Image (cartoon, rainbow, N blue to C red):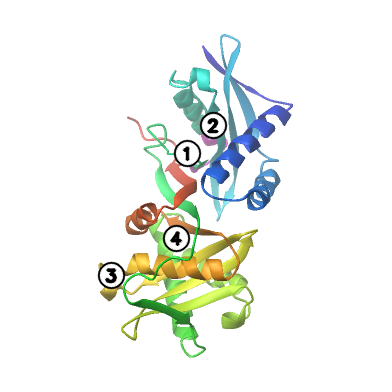
């Protein structure tokens, strides 16, 4: 019989979690200094997790970690870790742990539950909707230009229109991911852009690009260098809708990769929101691996 017992001493579990996360980050091309900084963020967030050991007939088969807290005004649960030891994989323990976690969170009033994955969701979380992914790629030599697309710095005159468009696009991504209402998404967009670009176009360590083909603007790029040690974070590489379907998406990626290397970083990282299958497919084709994927499900789980 599968049983769940809450741990008092979580040291061994945390050590194993960090080992697994380091391996996952390394596989995605993230260097050790950046990985350690990411782990610092994990350590800061696990203090309120409830960690249970999963046993069958007294033998340990894995761990599951859960928490409930506020998520933009909604009480939400979270599966912070669900790991079945290799000798016991495929024995139905993962499903039992998922069901236990959903019940634990629902009992505490959670209206939805999320899970953060570092591996493909597989069947276990197939019914959870994708909220977003973090993708990364370790870059090699500077990329060759794609077609006749070039990239140049954005001008002060171009910045206000770009800012308004980016804020609207960001709010739209949040709404499409199903996490906030229209009004809440607009407010979040305003707050986040004020925090990210306090000095506008002159904000240090940010590169804002205009992509052109045959002298005509076709898109823009926004990158934050040294987001993590050796890592540039791509807040956006966008091609205008009327120019899509012509291979310019890959050209935009190449421009971002070139700017990353020029700034002295070696890894480029992006977030892609749930529902944006076009971007996910582009990142996959360009060799960007999933570092983390967040999925969520409304509680209680619908009856089968």
* Gap between marks 2 and 3 measured at Cα: 39 Å
User: At 73% across and 26% down in the image, what residue appears?
Assistant: 8
Q: Nearer the viewer, mark 1 or mark 2?
A: 1
Question: Is 164 or 291 nearer to us in this picture?
Answer: 291
Q: Badge 3 local density, few (<14 within 10 Å), some, or many (20+)?
A: few
Query: Is residue 153 found inside the magenta-colored segment of the image?
Result: no
**Which numbered disc flags the more N-terminal residue, 1 or 4?**
1
Residue 175 spot, x, y in % from top left? 41, 60
Q: Nearer the viewer, mark 1 or mark 4?
A: 1
* Gap between marks 1 and 2 measured at Cα: 11 Å
Residue 178 spot, x, y in % from top left? 41, 54
Mark 4 near mark 2, Cβ–Cβ under 8 Å?
Answer: no
Q: Which mark is residue 119?
A: 1
Question: Is 27 or 219 nearer to us in this picture?
Answer: 27
**Which numbered disc flags the more N-terminal residue, 2 or 3?**
2
The residue at which mark 3 appears reads as 244
Q: Which mark is residue 82?
A: 2
**Which numbered disc flags the more N-terminal residue, 1 or 3?**
1
**Which numbered disc flags the more N-terminal residue, 1 or 2?**
2
* Gap between marks 1 and 4 measured at Cα: 23 Å
**Which numbered disc flags the more N-terminal residue, 4 or 2?**
2
Residue 22 spot, x, y in % from top left? 61, 41
The residue at which mark 4 appears reads as 174
Tell which residue pokes out farthest to the front in this image. 141
User: At 54% across and 75% down in the image, what residue appears?
Assistant: 207
Let me know if residue 110 appears in the view.
Answer: yes
Q: Badge 4 local density, few (<14 within 10 Å), some, or many (20+)?
A: many
- Compared with residue 196, is residue 202 higher up or lower down, i.e. above or below? below
* Gap between marks 1 and 3 measured at Cα: 30 Å
Is residue 267 left or right of 198 when viewed as pictured? left
User: At 48% across and 85% down in the image, what residue appears?
Assistant: 160
- Say what secondary structure mark 4 lies in: helix
């Amino acid at each position: 019989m599968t049983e769940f017992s809450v741990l008092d001493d979580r040291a061994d579990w945390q050590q194993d979690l960090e080992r697994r996360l380091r391996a996952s980050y390394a596989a995605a091309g993230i260097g050790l200094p950046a990985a350690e900084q990411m782990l610092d963020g994990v350590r800061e967030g696990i203090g309120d997790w409830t960690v249970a050991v999963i046993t069958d007939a007294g033998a340990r088969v894995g761990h599951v970690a859960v928490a409930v807290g506020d998520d933009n005004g909604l009480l939400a649960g979270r599966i912070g870790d669900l790991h079945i030891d290799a000798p016991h994989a495929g024995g139905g323990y993962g499903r039992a742990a998922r069901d236990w976690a959903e019940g634990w969170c629902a009992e505490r009033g959670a209206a939805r539950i999320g899970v953060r994955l570092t591996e493909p969701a597989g069947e276990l979380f197939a019914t959870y909707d994708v909220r977003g992914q973090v993708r990364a790629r370790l870059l090699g030599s500077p990329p060759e230009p794609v077609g006749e697309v070039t990239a140049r710095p954005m001008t002060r005159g171009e910045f206000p229109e770009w800012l308004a468009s980016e804020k609207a696009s960001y709010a739209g991504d949040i709404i499409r991911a199903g996490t906030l209402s229209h009004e809440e998404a607009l407010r979040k967009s305003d707050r986040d852009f004020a925090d990210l670009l306090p000095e506008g176009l002159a904000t240090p360590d940010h590169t804002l690009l205009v992509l052109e083909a045959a002298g005509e603007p076709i898109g823009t790029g926004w990158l934050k260098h040294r987001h993590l040690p050796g890592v540039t974070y791509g807040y956006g590489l966008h091609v205008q809708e009327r120019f899509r379907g012509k291979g310019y998406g890959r050209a935009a990626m190449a421009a971002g990769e070139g700017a990353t290397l020029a700034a002295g970083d070696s890894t480029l990282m992006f977030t892609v929101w749930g529902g944006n299958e076009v971007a996910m497919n582009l990142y996959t084709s360009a060799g960007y691996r999933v570092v983390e994927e967040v999925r969520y499900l409304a509680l209680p789980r619908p009856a089968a």
